[in-house]
Image (cartoon, rainbow, N blue to C red):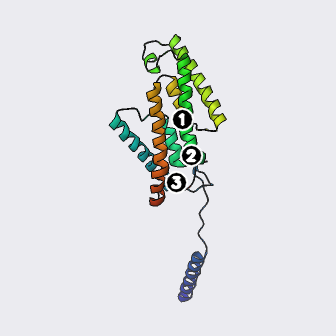
Amino acid sequence: MVAAATSRRQLQRECFCRTATTLPLRLPDFTLPGQDTDRDLDLRDEYSATVNVFLHFAVLGAITLVTGRPFLFPSLGPSAYLMATGEKARAEGAYHVIGGHAVAVGAGLLAYALVGNEVSAYVVFDRPDPAFSWDLVYLTVSATIAMMLTTTTMLLTKTNHAAACATTLIVALGLMGGLEDAAIIVTAVAILWYFHDRVLSTLAERYGFKPRDARD
């Protein structure tokens, strides 16, 4: 009788083991907060953009160091980001990148010449109490006119490049100005685009740090 009971338990264990090995193990589906379910996480894209941006600014930083001139300025950041990530294919073209910034420089110079009154945001905001000053009025009007001119001209010429709007404000607020700074801005943008398109893109394709898909 004991032997029979032992045989039954042995048979039950064997049946359970066979069932457990044949049934598929399925875990419940879950989504992390903020996770895009239509796109798998691809770390190589994120790292490749970082490498691209590093190389962009390493080159421009070296030029700035050697020349002592401002080949680094804030509006280069958005342009470099768009090119490094491939987020907007049209934004990578020379016509849009260089053309957009050139339009912005021209609009900023014109607006500042008309109403800027040769003041600079650096100086104005360094004062103890600049509120309600005429200099702030001049800068506000200059910035507004520059943005209006830049927006209209980029749309008319189809040189749409959002980062250029930061360039026109830099010039219109007197942070960078004059023909020398204008030439430096356009030259820096041209170097950025040329280095990315003719040098970096080739290396990225060869060594695998080119983003494989754009961010929508």
The image shows residue 185, relative to residue 95, as above or below, that is above
Residue at image position (55%, 49%) is: 86
Alpha-carbon distance for marks 2 and 1? 12 Å
Q: At 60% from the left edge and 77% from the top edge, which residue is drawn?
A: 22
**Who is closer to the viewer here, 130 or 65?**
65
Residue occupied by mark 1: 101
Picture coordinates of residue 207, whole percent (x, y)? 44, 59
Q: Earlier in the sequence, mark 3 or mark 1?
A: 1
Query: Is disc 2 placed on a helix, strand or loop?
Result: loop
Q: Secondary structure at mark 1?
A: helix
> What's the amino acid at mark 2?
Gly
Q: CA distance from mark 3 to mark 2?
A: 17 Å
Quadrant containing the N terminus is bottom right
Question: What amino acid type is highlighted by mark number 1?
Answer: His
Mark yes or no: residue 75 visible: yes
The extreme left residue here reads 66
Q: CA distance from mark 3 to mark 1?
A: 24 Å
Residue placed most toward the observer, 97 or 216: 97
Q: Earlier in the sequence, mark 3 or mark 2?
A: 2
Query: Which disc is residue 145 wearing?
Result: none
Q: Nearer the viewer, residue 39 or 4?
A: 39
Q: Is residue 54 shown left or right of residue 114?
A: left
Q: Is label 2 in contact with label 1 (beta carbons under 8 Å)?
A: no
The nearer-to-camera label among 3 and 1 is 1
| Total numbered labels | 3
User: Which residue is rendered at x = 47% and y = 56% of the image?
Assistant: 202
Residue 131 visible in the picture: no
Q: Which residue is mark 2?
A: 93
Query: x, y (%) of residue 139?
Result: 53, 18
Sort mark 1 into few (<14), some (14-19) or many (20+) by Cα contacts within 10 Å: many
**Disc marking residue 211:** 3
Q: Are marks 3 and 2 in contact (CB under 8 Å)?
A: no
